[in-house]
Amino acid sequence: MADRQDHWVFYFDPNRCIGCHACSISCKQFHGRDSDADDWRTVTHHEKGTHPASEEYDADTSSPIENVPISMSCMHCHDAPCEEVCPTEAIVKRDSDGIVTIDQDKCIGCKYCGWACPFGAPTYGDNGLMSKCNMCLDQGPGSGAGAESKNEQDNPIQPNCVSDCVGGAIKAGPEKEMVKEASQAAAERFKSNNERVIVEPFQGEENLDMVEHAATPDNAGD
Amino acid sequence: MSVTGGSEWLWLPHVHWAQFIALYLFLGGTAGGAYVTSSWASLMKSLMDTDSWLGKILLARTDDDEHRYACAETARWGSVLSVLSIAVGGVALLSHLGAPLRALTFPVLFTNFGSWLVIGTWVIVLFTVVAALETLWLHFGANLQSQSGLSMFPRRILGWIDGVAPWSADRGIVWLLDTIADTTRPPSRVHGAFRLVGGALALLLIAYTAMLLSDVAVVPLWERTYLPFIFLLSGVSTGISAALLGTVASGGALTRTNHRFCLTDDAIIVVELVAIGLLVSYLASSPDVAANVTETALFGTYGLEFVGGVLILGTGLPVVLSITVTMLHQFTDVGETLWGERLLTGGYALKYTLVLVGGFLLRYVILMAAVKTPLAVPGL
Amino acid sequence: MTDRVVLAAAGVVPMSEREGTLTRRNLLKTAGAAAGAAALGGCLSGDGTDSAPSGELSTAFGNCWMCSHNCGQKAYVQDGTVVNLTGVDGHPRGSAGPDTEGTLCPKGLAQLDKTHDPKRIKEPHIRDEDGTLRKVDWETAFEETAKRLVAFAEENGSETFLDATSWAETSIFRTVWRDLYGSPERISRGIHVCAGPTFVTGGMMGVGSNNRVPDYQNSEYIIAWGRNILNSFAGQFEAKGVLEAIEENGATLVTIDPQHTITAQKSDEWMPIEPRTDGALALAMANVIIEEELYDEEFVENHTYGFEAYREAAAEMPPEEAAEITGLDADQIRRVARGFAEAAPQAGISVWTGTAQAGNGWKATQNITALNGLVGNIDRPGGLRLWKYPATASFGQVCEEDYTPRAEYKEPALKKYDEYSDYPVRHIEGIAHNLVPEMVDNDHINGIVCHHDDPLKDGNADAWIEAIEAMDLVISIDAYWNGVSRRADIVLPEATQLEKDTLGTGNWSAYPNHKWITGSKAAVDPQWNTKPDFDILTGIADAMAERTDNDDWTIFQQWDSHEEYIDDQLSTLDLTLEELDSGETNYELLEEYDYEQYGEDFTFRFDLDQVSSFATAAEEAGMDTAPEWISPGTYGDSTSEEYPLEFTDVRSVFFSHGSNQPHERLQDQFAKRNQLSEEDYRGNYLYLHPRDAEERGIETGDLVTIESKSGSGDLMAIVTERARPGFVTSQYGFGQTSAITTGEDARERSADGMNTMTLHDTQMDPITGQVDRHIAVDVTPAGGD
Ligand SMILES: Nc1nc2c(c(=O)[nH]1)N[C@H]1C(S)=C(S)[C@@H](COP(=O)(O)OP(=O)(O)OC[C@H]3O[C@@H](n4cnc5c(=O)[nH]c(N)nc54)[C@H](O)[C@@H]3O)O[C@H]1N2
Ligand SMILES: Nc1nc2c(c(=O)[nH]1)N[C@H]1C(S)=C(S)[C@@H](COP(=O)(O)OP(=O)(O)OC[C@H]3O[C@@H](n4cnc5c(=O)[nH]c(N)nc54)[C@H](O)[C@@H]3O)O[C@H]1N2
Ligand code: SF4
Ligand code: SF4
Ligand code: SF4
Ligand code: SF4
Ligand code: SF4
Ligand SMILES: [Mo]
C-alpha cells in the first residue's frame, strides 16, 4: 500500500488565480470534450460589496466591491464520499496514487455520487454516465480506471489544467511535494480539513507582507 | 449567482433527482406501508377467524361480517398495491438511470454493500418476492374462486384474458395461479411468521429511502436524525391510505376496519407533522447557510408544494377531514341514508387521496429543495 | 434562491457531453462511431471509448499568434490534427522566466480549434461581374488580383490604395504594398486605433513606446494605469510578472480604473477614477512628489528637459483639487504618490489604452509618462525598461536584388490636400482612422488591402462600412468571414499560425536582460485550400511580375520558401529556424543588455516644445506643449440630458480584439464567466451599475439598446457593482462586422452582440488621430430577454 504521502492532491492559490478559465478550456480540449459539455474543472466568480463611487458607499462601513475567481475540479478526496456511496464500485480511490477514478463500464448512472460529492465534481454526459477529472491519468471520459499508478509511470502526464494555468494558481502532485509548496497555514488547514485539497489562505489587504516563499519594432505588439 | 444571504459562497451545481426519483421514493414508501397494512388486516381477519381472545381485545367483536369482509379486502388491496407500487416505482427508478439495463445485472454489479443503494436494491428485491407471494396467496386458490370484492380485480382481468385467449379457460392463467397458490400456501402459523418477516422488510424498505438520502452528508435537508423517521411515518401513512382507498372502493368505507385504520393513520400523520416541524426548526437554527437557504426554498420557491401541498393538503386537511367524517359517522345518523353513505364514502376517499398526493409532494419537495452546503470562498 | 433551485424548478438538468472520444474533434471523423456508442451508452456495453486516432503522437512548436504576442506553444499532433496544446517552459513571452512553467491563455488554447475550424474561409474567392463571390483556385485568384491591382493603379493611382495589413507573421507586407505597389497610405493598429497618445508621447518624451510594459519582475511598486494587465496581457509574462512581483518582492500593485477589474481585485490600492481625469491625477501625484521632494533630483538635473514648466503645471494641481476632479480621495492620491516615489527606481507604471483612447488622452499620457522622468526610474531595475530588440536582418539586408521603392516620394493625402487642413493630426501622422471615410468621399482613397485587420470595429463604424462598399477594390487576406472579407472583391484565405513557419521577436518579455527570439515550423499543413501569408504575398508578386513586366516584382523569387527567408533574417544571429524549432524549447536568449544604457546625453522631455511637428499640432489644437490639465469634453463627448451615461469599450481575456469571436469554446466560457451561459446569447455584454440599471428598469440578462447621437445597437445587460455609476462598458469586436460565428454558407446572418463603434462618429485625439472611445450614450430596455 502506497504511503498516504504519495497520494496526489491539488493545490490552489486563490491569490494567483486570475479567473481566466484557461484551466477549464485546457481540460476540455485535452479530454476531447465538446464546448457544451459540463466542465470537469470549473471557474466561478464571486462578488460582494459596493462600488466606491456609488451613492450607497460609505468608506467607514461599506466594503468595496470584490470579485473573486475560484477554480475547482474533483479534489481526489482522501475520504472520497463519492466512492462510499457508489453502488457498483465504479469509483475507486486508488491506493497507489490516491487518484479517484471512474470506470464507466461499471457505472449505472444513478447520480448518487453527484449528491455525495462536496465539490460538485461528477458530471453526467449525454450517455448519462459519470465522468470527472482523472488527474489526466489518460484522455477522455472514464479513462484512467485501472491505469498504472502515476507514481510508477515513467513519464506521467502532467495534468493539463496545471500545464496551462496562466496564474500558476493550481498545482498537482503527491501530497508530500504539494505540502512543501504550501504555506504553513495552508498545510495546517489541509490537515484539519479532511485532507482533500490544499488551499492557500487568501491574502487581503490586512496581511500584505505575507511573502512566504512582426511588426515594426516601434509598435510591435500593439 | 444571486443567493439570499450573500454570494460569498460557492454554491455547488447539482445533479438532480427530480420527479422520477420523487415518484420512486414515494412509491417505495407506499409499497412498504401497503404491505404492512395488508399484514395487519390479515392478522385481524385471522384473529376473527379463530375467535381468539386477542381478537376480542383488539376488535371488541369478532362476529362482524362487514368487518371481516373489509379486513379481507384491505389485506388484498394492500398486497396487490404494494406489488404494483414497487413495480411502477422500479420502472421510475430505472428510467432515471444512465444505464438502466446495466443496472439489471445488480447481483453481479452491485458490490459495494456499504452503499444504501445496494442495500436498498436487495431490500427491494426480497420485498418484491415476499409481496408477490402474499398477493398470490391472497388472490388465488381454489377456495377463493367465489370470493367477491373489488380487490379481486387481478383475478378478473386474468380471467377475462383466459376467456379471449386461445387456450382453454379451464386450464388458463387463473387455474395455473390457483394451483400454484394452493400448492405453495404455507400453513397459517408459517404464513404468520412469513408476514412478520415481510413486515420487517417493508419497514426497512420505507426507511431505506430515507437512509439513501441522509447518507449524503452535505445536504442539511436530508438530516439523518429526522428524515428516516419522517419517511417511515409517511410511508406507513400513505400505505394505509392506498390500501384503504381500495377498501373504500370495495364498499368498506363505513366498516370498523376502515374506521380504525383511518384513525391510526391520523395519529401517524400528526406525529409526522411534528417530525417535519422538528426538521424545519433544525434547518432554521442551523449555522449552515445551506440549511437556511433550504428553509427559504421550502417556504419560498417550493412554498406551494411544501406548505400548500405537504402541510395543508397532504397532512393537515386529511386529518381534519377524517375526524369530521368519523364524527359524522359515529355520532350522527348521516351514514344511515344512501346520500349520507355516499357522502361519508366520498369523504374517506378524498382523505386517502390527499394523503397520497401529500406523500408524493413530500418526496418531491425533499428532493427539489435540497441545497448542498456551499464552500466558503476564500477572501469573501 | 440558488441557481440550482431555480434550475431544478425549471426542470433543467444540464447534460451534454460526447463520449467515445479519446482526443478532440479530429474525431469528427469518428462521429458516426461515437453516435453508435451513444446509442449503446444506455446499455450494457459501456460507452465505447475505443475510437482513438491511430497515428503516432508527435510534438511540434508554435508561436501563439491568437493575440499576436508570441507565447511559445507545444503542439501535440496526431494524424495531421492538433490534439493538444500547452506552453513552452521558460518562454520569454509565455512564462515568468527561467525555470517557470510556460502556459497558454484561453485565446492561445483556442488555436487548437482555430486550426481545424470549419467556419474558416476555405477557398480563395473573387467577386464576379454580377456581384457574387465565387470560389476560384489560387492561380486564378492571383491572376485576378494582379489584373485588378494593375487596373486600379491605372484608374485611380496606386497612391489611393490603403494598406491595412495588421498582424503579419512575415515582414514582407510593407515591401509588397508600399515599396512595390507604391501606396504611401498605411493604417495600422498601433498609433491609429490602439493607443496613439501613449506611443507618440513616449516617443517624443524619449522612451519610445516602452511606457507600456515596465520591468515587472524587479519592481516593488507597480501602477496599472488604465490597464487591466491580468486580463489583457500582451503575452502571459505580463500577468505572471505582476503576480511574481507581488509574491517574490512583496510589490504593491495599484490599479487606476473607473471599473472594477481582476487587476483591481488583486491590487493593494484601487483608484476608481472618474473616466478621462487621469491627467489631473498624474499632475497631483507630481505635485506631492515635488512638494515633498521625493523626486530624483539627480536624474531630473542631468537627464530631463522642461522641468520648470512641469513643476508649474503640477503646482496648480494639489491633491485636493485633483480629488474634486477625479472623484478620488486626496489621502489616497498622496499615499500612492509617496509609495510610488519612495519605491522608485524600483517602481513602474504600465500605461497603454485606458488613458489613451480619449480626446484628452494626449495630456493624460504625457502627464503619466512624465512621472517616470520625475522619479528617475528610466531603465533602472523595476522601473521603465528601455526594452531592446535583437538585430535580425531587415528586408533590405537580405534582399539581393535591386528594386525601386515606389512610394518613397508620395505624400499621404492627409498632408497633401487642403481638405484636411483643419486636422492638427496631419502634422504628426499620415492618416487617421476616423478620417478614412471622408478621404474615400474625396476620392483620395479608392481601394484597400486588409490583412488580419478589421477596421470596421475600430471606430466610425457606419461610415467605414459605407466607405468599404464605395471603394473600387477591396482585397481581404483573412481567415474568417468578417465585415471586410464579406464585402471584399478578392478574398484570399490565410492559413493560421500552426500551419506555417513563423518567426517571432519583440521587446518586452520575462527576461529583462536579454534580447530573445522565438520561432517555429509549421506543425500541420495549411488546412483546406489556404496558404500562409508569405505564400499569398509572393503569389501576388509573381502574378504582378507576369502582368506588368516589372522585374521589381520578382525579388521574392530568390527564396524558395518562407523558411529560407526566415533563415536569411536569422543569419545575423547565426541561427536557423531548424535550430530554433528543435530541442526542448523554441526560443533562444540572445545578447544580454544591462540597465541604464542610455548614455550621458539621454534626455527625457517633460515639455515637448522642441518637437516642432508637435508644437505646431498642439498650437492648432489649442494645447500647451508642457504637461497640463485638459478636461474631458474639450475634444470629445460630454454627457448630456439626452445621453447621460459615458460609454467606453473594454477587453475580455477570451478574445483578441475582433479576431477570435467565432470560437465556441471561448464564447461559452465567456458566457460562463459572466454567469449567463444558460442564455442562448453569445455576444458582448453591457455592464452597468445597479443605480443606472434601476433608473431604467434593467436587470441582468435583459436585452438593452444602447444609443449615442450617431448610432445604436442591442446587447445583453449585466447589472453589477463592478461598473462605475454613470459609466457603462462593453467588450468590443462583436456584432455583424466582426469575424462571426456563421460559416461561409450563411455569410450575412447576424451574430449576437453589437459592434460598439456604431456608437462612434469621428471623436479623436486631435494630435495623433487616435480614436476617442468615450462616448455619451443612453441605455434603454430593448423589450426582450
Ligand atoms: N485578452 C486580450 N488581451 C489583450 C488584447 C485583447 O484584445 N484581448 N489586446 C492587446 C492589445 S493590442 C493591447 S493594446 C493591450 C491593451 O491592454 P489594456 O490597456 O490593459 O486594455 P484594457 O483591458 O482594455 O484595459 C483598459 C482599462 O482602462 C479602463 N479605462 C477606461 N477609461 C479609462 C479612463 O479614462 N481612465 C483610466 N484610468 N482607465 C480607463 C477600462 O475600464 C479598462 O479596464 O491588451 C493586449 N492584450
Ligand atoms: N472599439 C474598439 N476597437 C479597437 C480597440 C478598442 O479598444 N475598442 N482597440 C484597438 C487595438 S488596441 C488594436 S491593437 C486593434 C487591433 O485590431 P486589428 O488589427 O483589426 O486586429 P483584430 O481585430 O485582432 O483582427 C481582425 C481580423 O483578423 C481576422 N483574423 C483572425 N485570425 C486570422 C488569421 O490567422 N489570419 C488572418 N489573415 N486574419 C485573421 C479576423 O477576421 C478579424 O476580424 O484594435 C483596435 N480596435
Ligand atoms: S471531489 Fe467529489 S468526486 Fe472527487 S473524490 Fe471528492 S467526493 Fe469524489
Ligand atoms: S453515477 Fe455511476 S459512478 Fe456515480 S454512484 Fe452511480 S454508478 Fe457510481
Ligand atoms: S487534472 Fe486533467 S482531468 Fe483533472 S481538471 Fe485538470 S485537466 Fe481536467
Ligand atoms: S487557469 Fe489558473 S489562473 Fe486561470 S482561472 Fe484557471 S486556475 Fe485561475
Ligand atoms: S497571451 Fe495568450 S493569446 Fe496572446 S500570444 Fe500568449 S497565449 Fe497567445
Ligand atoms: Mo493594441
Image (spheres, helix red, strand yellow):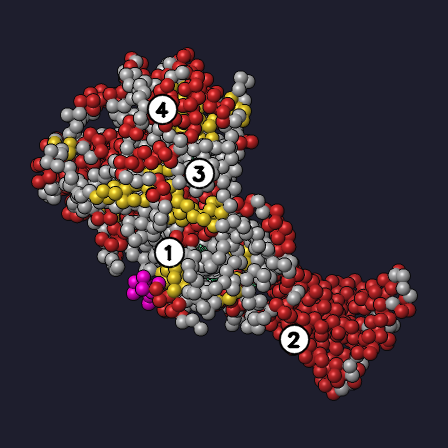
The answer to which quarter of the image holds residue C235 is top left
- Mark 4 packing: few (<14 Cα in 10 Å), some, or many (20+)? some
- Secondary structure under the numbered disc 2 in the rendered image: helix
Image position, residue B360 (x, y; %): 63, 62
Residue under numbered circle 4: C555
- Mark 3 packing: few (<14 Cα in 10 Å), some, or many (20+)? many
Q: Residue at x 46, y 46 (%)?
A: C77
Residue under numbered circle 2: B201
Q: Residue at x 36, y 44 (%)?
A: C581
Discs 2 and 3 share one subunit: no
Which amino acid is tagged 2?
A: Leu
- Please indicate whether residue C658 sits to the left or right of residue B271 in the image: left
Image position, residue C442 (x, y; %): 37, 14
Image position, residue C743 (x, y; %): 53, 34
On the question of residue C776 being in view, the answer is no
Q: Which mark is residue C499?
A: 3
Residue stretch rendered in magenta on the structure: A178-188
Name the chain letter of the residue that bears numbered label 1: A
Does ligand 6 reach within 8 Å of label 1's beta carbon?
yes
Q: Which mark is residue C621?
A: none
On the rendered image, what quadrant is the C terminus of chain B found in?
Answer: bottom left
Residue under numbered circle 1: A170
The Cα atoms of the two marked residues, 1 and 4, are separated by 51 Å
The Cα atoms of the two marked residues, 1 and 3, are separated by 31 Å
**Which callout, 1 or 4, points to the residue nearer the camera?**
4
Eyeballing the image, is C160 above or below B349?
Answer: above
- Please indicate whether residue C131 sits to the left or right of residue C220 in the image: right
Image position, residue B289 (x, y; %): 43, 61
